[in-house]
Amino acid sequence: MELTWREKHLLRAIGQACRYPVARFELHSDSSEELVMTALDYVRITEPEDSMELIKERAGALKALRQKGLIAADFSVNIWVAGDYDVYYRSAVYELLCHTAMEAAKRPDTLFTIPMLVKGYLRLTRRGEQYCKIK
């Protein structure tokens, strides 16, 4: 199986971490709980200044690893370590999401006005563990 440099790097990092936090940036509707739009998925931020380009590149690699069956994501975790997500709340990209929602809320015809950071963790699958042992 061929992996890009970014995919290999992320796979090793996930394997070596005791927890590997990721997030999903969503916009919710204040008029209906069912209306949710995903703005960014598989967000991995390591520095508050991480650029949108870098975050999207990481997200693409993480999605590819999931599609290849090497990692699994869990966004249903009810208990998490708060410090794992401090950098997300301080990030320029999350700030942009919040400002975008605030600006959208000023228009009466906008559905998605509530920014939400959905917390999750990634882990290696058995296939991912085997891949890391081989490489």
Image (cartoon, grey):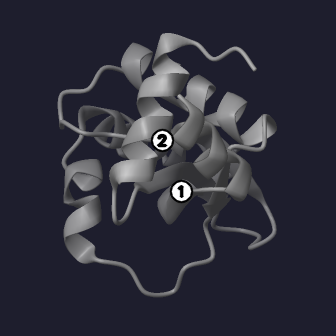
Q: Position of residue 50 (x, y in %)?
A: 26, 26
Q: Amino acid at mark 2?
A: Val
* Residue 3 in the image: above or below residue 38: above
Disc 1 to disc 2, how far (Cα)? 11 Å
Task: Check disc 1 and report the residue beneath it.
Answer: 122
- In the image, 40: left or right of 48? right
Say what secondary structure mark 1 lies in: strand
Task: Check disc 2 and report the residue beneath it.
Answer: 43
Q: Quadrant of residue 36?
A: bottom right
* Residue 14 in the image: above or below residue 82: above
Q: Position of residue 80 (x, y in %)?
A: 38, 79
- Which of 82 and 1 lies nearest the eye of the viewer? 1
Q: Is residue 56 visible?
A: no
- In the image, 67: left or right of 97? right
Q: Nearer the viewer, mark 1 or mark 2?
A: 1
Q: Residue at x 81, y 69 (%)?
A: 34
The image's mark for residue 61 is none
- Which of 110 and 121 lies nearest the eye of the viewer? 121
| Earlier sequence position, callout 1 versus callout 2 | 2
Q: Residue at x 29, y 77 (%)?
A: 81
